[in-house]
Image (cartoon, rainbow, N blue to C red):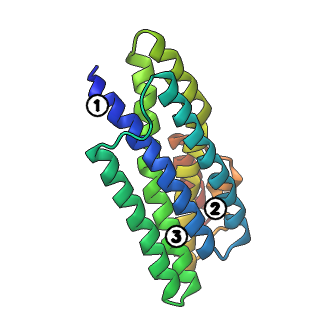
Amino acid sequence: MNHEQVIDLLLQSLEHERGGIQVYETALECVQNDDLREEFEKYLEETRNHEQVLLGLCEALEIDPETETPGREIVRTVGGSLVEAMKKAKAAGKPDAAEIVACECVVLAETKDHLNWELIGQLADAGKGDAVEALQEAYDEVEDQEDEHLYHSKGWCRELWLQALGLKAQLPPPEERKHVKTAIGAARAEQARKGKN
């Protein structure tokens, strides 16, 4: 394994969770739907915990969690851009449109977050030594939540867009009602949704 890249991935993941906290805090300022608000409040709390899990992982692997890397700076910039996009959407004065932008920004953030944790899981699978146990414990604690964050947020985004387009929307989305936590489950929920329309 490339030790330098492993460290960079973990630091980018930490930075992304920190940015994710800001993304959810800002998204909550844009949310209109009470069910979505409840969902995002839950995800915000889980994201705060994910930051702590990564801080613990850095400590276990003897990585300074405040080390700056070019990749980390880019992650911070992208997260800041998502927050700025939501603020601009909210300032435009169209609450329904701002809610959709917030959902889109969450989906973008959760897509990268999901990838980070998938890679951490791959490191745990391929690794050797003491680091493997720490990586595996962190992955096991977070992965199911990350799956839910991604698949449910995508469902919310799709359904809010359908509603805005004047098409039949299912709110909360099928992913939420079926408690989807896998790609297969998300595909099945979307397929079942298509069958009802």
At mark 1, the secondary structure is helix
Looking at the rendered structure, which numbered label has been put on residue 102? 3
Contact? badges 1 and 2 (CB < 8 Å): no
Q: Mark 2 belongs to which amino acid?
A: Pro
| Whole-percent x, y for residue 25 in the image | 59, 64
Residue 142 lies, in percent from the top left, at 58, 36
* For the residues bearing labels 1 and 3, Cβ distance under 8 angstroms: no
Residue at the image point whose x is 43% and y is 72% from the top? 84
The disc placed on residue 173 is 2
Residue marked by disc 1: 5
Q: Residue at x 67, y 68 (%)?
A: 171
Q: Is residue 118 visible?
A: yes
Asked if residue 194 shows in the view, the reply is no
What amino acid is labelled 1 in the image? Gln
At label 3, the amino acid type is Ala
From the image, state whether disc 1 or disc 3 is nearer to you. 1
